[in-house]
Amino acid sequence: YVQRRIDEGASPATVNKALAFIRGMFAKSVHWGYLSVDPTQNVSTLKTEELSPDALTEQQVEDLLTVLKGKCSYSVVLVAVDTGLRWQELRRLTWGDVDWNFGDFGSIEVGKSKAKNFRVVPLTERVHSHLKDKYEQAQENSKVVPLMKKLPVLPSPLDSSTPFFDVRRPLSAAGYKIGIGHIHLHQLRHTWATRLRDKEVPLDRIMELGGWSSYAMVQKYAKSRPTHLIKAIAALNV
């Protein structure tokens, strides 16, 4: 089956998804007593090449934010592209995690992340300004101000007491509108890391801010753009 699918032109990832489905059916058959042995237990998945999504340029970031301005997804995208937080970290973010007095523009405290570590991420000036406005609006709308700390920073447009769930459609639509095609939320984490590397921020600082556990993971996200590689070699011409 695997070889036939490959011969038909299916990608390794597609074949692996089909195998996972087939394995699930056989596993259930064994569990329900229809089969005594799972015939797929010794079938290995195919190796796949994990490709990192392209990071957006500064101009593309600005164009994206301009298109989303005034929409519910704007806040999520702005915070994501300027903090590098993961989807689940963005959803868990509450006003109690925001420290307005840290540094020049405040910070957010990120609890245990994928790498199981705690970190503090300083805010950019535009994120500070945007969140400050949202915080004041939330205070005006909140019936019990002391409970503000438990409210999500990035709430659902339908219920301010629950975090947003999905911005895939508006984000993808905005990507097509500015001429770069489909964009997904995790791509903004790659963009954030690459933007920091563009500014010559050391990899160890990017690793700490992003909550990665190894330099290999940082380099996977914080790519050197071709123009910077050209500039690096140009230094030999001096």
Image (cartoon, rainbow, N blue to C red):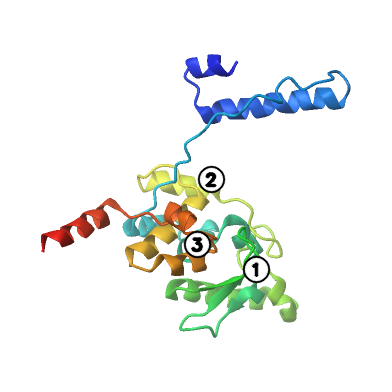
Up-down relation of residue 44 to residue 98 (above or below): above
Q: Is residue 217 left or right of residue 37?
A: left
Instruction: Of the two numbered discs 3 and 1 on the same chain, state the one appearing first in sequence.
Output: 3
Quarter the N terminus occupies: top right
Residue 170 spot, x, y in % from top left:
51, 49
Residue under circle 2?
169
Q: Are marks 2 and 1 in contact (CB under 8 Å)?
A: no
Local packing at callout 3 (Cα closer than 10 Å; few below 14, some 14-19, many 20+) is many
Residue under circle 1?
111
Up-down relation of residue 225 to residue 48 (above or below): below
SS under mark 2: helix
SS under mark 3: loop
Instruction: Of the two numbered discs 2 and 1 on the same chain, state the one appearing first in sequence.
Output: 1
Q: Are marks 3 and 2 in contact (CB under 8 Å)?
A: no
Q: Residue at x 36, y 48 (%)?
A: 178
Q: Is residue 173 left or right of residue 99?
A: left
Amino acid on which disc 1 is placed: Gly
Up-down relation of residue 136 to residue 71 (above or below): below
Residue 189 in view here: no
Residue under circle 3?
84
- Per the model, the C-alpha gap separating discs 2 and 1 is 28 Å
Quarter the C terminus occupies: bottom left
Amino acid on which disc 2 is placed: Arg
Amino acid on which disc 3 is placed: Gly
